[in-house]
C-alpha cells in the first residue's frame, strides 16, 4: 500500500495543477528568414579574401602594359611622320602635339570646356540609366511588352546616333536638349538590354530555390534576381557609356550651342583653322577621358567578379 501512495499523489497533482501551455513562438517574416538563409548561402560562394600584396607592385603590374601600348602607338606615329606620307601641316609629329597638349591643360578655358562636356556626359548618361533600367525591368517581366518592343530596343541600339541629330535639331533647335536627346537615345537601349539579358539568364534552379525559401515580392528581386543579373547589367552600363560618349562627341561637333565652348566646339574651331596640331591634341583629350571612365567600369566589374569568386588565382 505505501508503494502506491507516490503514484496516487502524482496523479492527484496532475489533476489539480493546471497544465501550462507552451509559449507560442513569434512568427518570423518569411521574406526576412529567406533573406537570412540566402545570405548564408552567398557566403559559401563568395571568393576568399586574399592578401593584396605590395601596393607598388600592383600599381606597376597594372600600369606597364598601358605604358607599353602608348609607346608603341607614339613610335608608329613618329615613323609615319618620318616617312613623309603626309605634309607636316596635315600630320604633325608627336612632339608638337604633346607640346600643344601641355599648353592646353594650363589654360583655365580648357578646363571650362572639359567641365561642360563632362556635365553633359554625366547628365545624359544618368537619364539613360534611369530610363533604360525602368524599360528593361518592365520588358523582362511582361511578355506582351517584350513581344511588342523587344526587337525595337535592339534596333535602336544598333542605329547610328548621328542619324538622330536632324530630328533632334528640328525638335529642340540648337540647344542643350538636342544633345541630351541623342545621348539618351544612344545609351538607354544598351542599359535596357543589359538588364534584360541579366534577368533572362538567372538560372531557373535559383528561382525555384528562392521560392522554396519563401522569397516573394521585393525580397525576391532584392536578394536573388538583381544580384544574379548584376554582372550583365554592369556590362550594359559600360556599353551604354560608350554609346553615350560617342553620341556626345558627335553632338558637340554638329550642334554648337551659342555661348558655350566645349571640347567638341574647340575641336571644330581647330578644324576650321586647319590646325592639325590642336585637332590631334583634342583627340587625345577625348581618348584619355574615355579610357579613364572605362577603367572605372573595369574596376567595378573586377570587384564584382572577385566578390563572387569568379577571378583566377
Image (tube, rainbow, N blue to C red):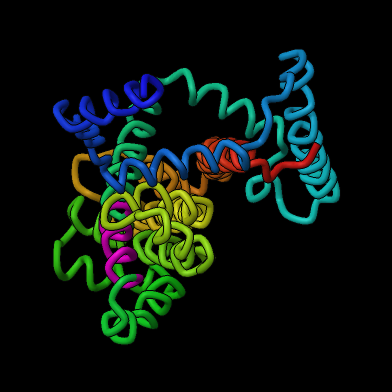
Tell me what residue is drawn at x 77 percent, y 45 percent: 77
User: What residue is drawn where x is 26% and y is 43%?
Assistant: 29
Q: Residue at x 71, y 51 (%)?
A: 87
- Figure quadrant of the C terminus: top right
> Quarter-wise, where is residue 154 in the image?
bottom left
In the image, the segment drawn in magenta is: 129-140
Camera-nearest residue between 45 and 36 = 36
In the rendered image, residue 226, in percent from the top left (x then y), is placed at 41, 52
Vertical order, 56 against 197 (above or below): above
Q: Is residue 133 magenta?
A: yes
Query: In the displayed structure, does residue 1 sit left or right of residue 279?
Result: left
Q: Position of residue 189 (x, y in %)?
A: 37, 66
Can the viewer see residue 278 in this picture? no
User: Which quadrant is the N terminus positioned in?
Assistant: top left
Residue 294's spot in the image, x, y percent?
Answer: 55, 42
State the residue in front, 20 or 49.
20
Overall secondary structure of the magenta section:
helix
Q: Is residue 149 visible?
A: yes
Please tell me which residue lies in front, 132 or 282.
Answer: 132
x 54%, y 41%: residue: 42
Decide whether residue 259 is among the magenta residues: no
Nearer-the-camera pick, 45 or 174: 45
Amino acid at each position: 500500500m505505501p508503494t502506491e501512495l507516490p503514484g496516487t499523489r502524482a496523479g492527484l497533482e496532475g489533476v489539480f495543477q493546471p497544465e501550462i501551455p507552451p509559449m507560442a513562438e513569434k512568427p518570423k517574416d518569411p521574406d526576412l528568414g529567406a533573406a537570412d538563409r540566402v545570405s548564408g548561402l552567398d557566403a559559401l560562394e563568395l571568393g576568399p579574401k586574399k592578401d593584396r600584396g605590395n601596393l607598388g607592385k600592383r600599381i606597376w603590374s597594372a600600369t606597364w602594359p598601358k605604358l607599353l601600348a602608348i609607346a608603341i602607338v607614339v613610335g608608329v606615329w613618329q615613323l609615319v611622320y618620318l616617312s613623309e606620307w603626309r605634309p607636316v601641316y596635315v600630320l604633325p609629329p608627336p612632339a608638337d602635339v604633346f607640346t600643344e597638349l601641355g599648353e592646353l591643360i594650363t589654360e583655365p578655358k580648357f578646363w571650362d570646356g572639359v567641365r561642360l562636356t563632362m556635365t553633359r556626359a554625366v547628365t545624359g548618361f544618368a537619364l539613360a540609366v534611369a530610363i533604360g533600367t525602368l524599360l528593361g525591368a518592365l520588358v523582362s517581366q511582361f511578355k506582351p511588352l517584350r513581344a511588342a518592343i523587344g526587337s525595337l530596343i535592339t534596333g535602336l541600339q544598333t542605329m547610328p546616333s548621328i542619324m538622330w541629330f536632324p530630328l533632334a535639331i528640328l525638335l529642340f533647335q540648337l540647344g542643350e536638349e538636342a544633345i541630351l536627346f541623342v545621348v539618351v537615345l544612344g545609351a538607354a537601349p544598351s542599359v535596357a538590354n543589359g538588364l534584360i539579358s541579366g534577368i533572362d539568364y538567372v538560372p531557373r534552379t535559383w528561382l525555384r530555390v528562392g521560392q522554396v525559401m519563401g522569397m516573394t515580392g521585393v525580397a525576391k528581386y532584392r536578394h536573388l534576381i538583381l544580384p544574379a543579373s548584376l554582372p550583365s547589367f554592369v556590362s550594359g552600363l559600360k556599353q551604354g557609356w560608350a554609346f553615350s560618349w560617342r553620341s556626345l562627341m558627335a553632338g558637340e561637333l554638329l550642334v554648337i550651342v551659342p555661348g558655350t565652348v566645349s571640347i567638341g566646339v574647340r575641336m571644330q574651331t581647330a578644324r576650321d583653322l586647319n590646325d592639325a596640331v590642336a585637332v590631334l591634341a583634342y583627340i587625345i583629350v577625348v581618348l584619355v577621358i574615355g579610357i579613364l571612365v572605362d577603367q572605372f567600369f573595369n574596376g567595378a566589374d573586377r570587384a564584382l567578379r572577385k566578390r563572387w569568386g569568379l577571378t583566377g588565382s
